[in-house]
């Protein structure tokens, strides 16, 4: 029994050491575009492009990404993707996501906007990037504002 516990602890220690790759730097993720796609239905579709920079000396085998986009505190878009590129060592890669809005959250947002019209909208993009293996997921959070024509930033 003690031998089994010792082997288990040794395996756990080796797995933990594999995670602690010296000099690991978190990849930089930026939003490169956000646009409305043409649609044949009343429900719009959006395309969100992300740019990923890998500052490490080993490639990142991206496994998955979950994300949500909020506008004025309402979660409008959510989605996941497992169609992600490998980002080479000291390299860059692009990820293109497509999403449809949550109808009830969008109605709630429009109701708020009818009650309090504005020209500047606050947005928030949140996501988790899975780089595989025993590495922890990378949290992404981008906030800002979008001004309509004639509005100020």
Image (tube, rainbow, N blue to C red):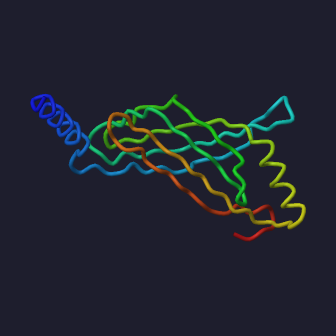
Q: State the image coordinates of residue 9 (x, y, percent, origin top left).
A: 17, 37
Q: Residue at x 90, y 61 (%)?
A: 114
Q: Give the farthest residue toward the right.
A: 114
Q: Report the quarter where the C terminus lies.
A: bottom right
Dividing the picture into quadrants, the one containing residue 2 is: top left
Q: Is residue 44 above or below residue 116?
A: above
Q: State the image coordinates of residue 101 (x, y, percent, origin top left).
A: 74, 41
Q: Residue at x 80, y 42 (%)?
A: 103
Q: Residue at x 18, y 32 (%)?
A: 8
Q: Nearer the viewer, residue 129 or 104?
A: 104
Q: Is residue 49 above or below residue 86?
A: below
Q: Nearer the viewer, residue 8 or 74?
A: 8
Q: Report the quarter where the N terminus lies.
A: top left
Q: Is residue 6 above or below residue 69?
A: above
Q: Nearer the viewer, residue 137 or 8?
A: 8
Q: Residue at x 33, y 34 (%)?
A: 133
Q: Is residue 92 left or right of residue 12?
A: right
Q: Give the farthest residue toward the left.
A: 3
Q: Give the farthest residue toward the bottom.
A: 152
Q: State the image coordinates of residue 80 (x, y, percent, origin top left).
A: 58, 35
Image mark count = 0
Q: Is residue 79 left or right of residue 17?
A: right
Q: Is residue 116 above or below residue 19?
A: below
């Amino acid at each position: 029994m003690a031998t089994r516990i010792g082997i288990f602890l040794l395996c756990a220690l080796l797995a933990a050491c594999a995670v602690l790759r010296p000099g690991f730097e978190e990849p930089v993720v930026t939003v490169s575009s956000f646009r409305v796609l043409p649609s044949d239905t009343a429900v719009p579709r959006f395309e969100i492009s992300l740019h990923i920079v890998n500052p490490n000396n080993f490639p990142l085998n991206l496994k998955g990404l979950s994300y949500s986009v909020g506008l004025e505190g309402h979660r409008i878009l959510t989605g996941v993707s497992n169609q992600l590129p490998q980002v080479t060592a000291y390299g860059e890669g692009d990820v293109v996501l497509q999403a449809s809005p949550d109808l009830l959250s969008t109605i709630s947002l429009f109701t708020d906007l009818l009650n309090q019209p504005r020209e500047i909208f606050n947005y928030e993009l949140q996501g988790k990037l899975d780089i595989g293996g025993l590495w922890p997921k990378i949290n992404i959070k981008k906030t800002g504002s979008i001004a309509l024509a004639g509005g100020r930033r």
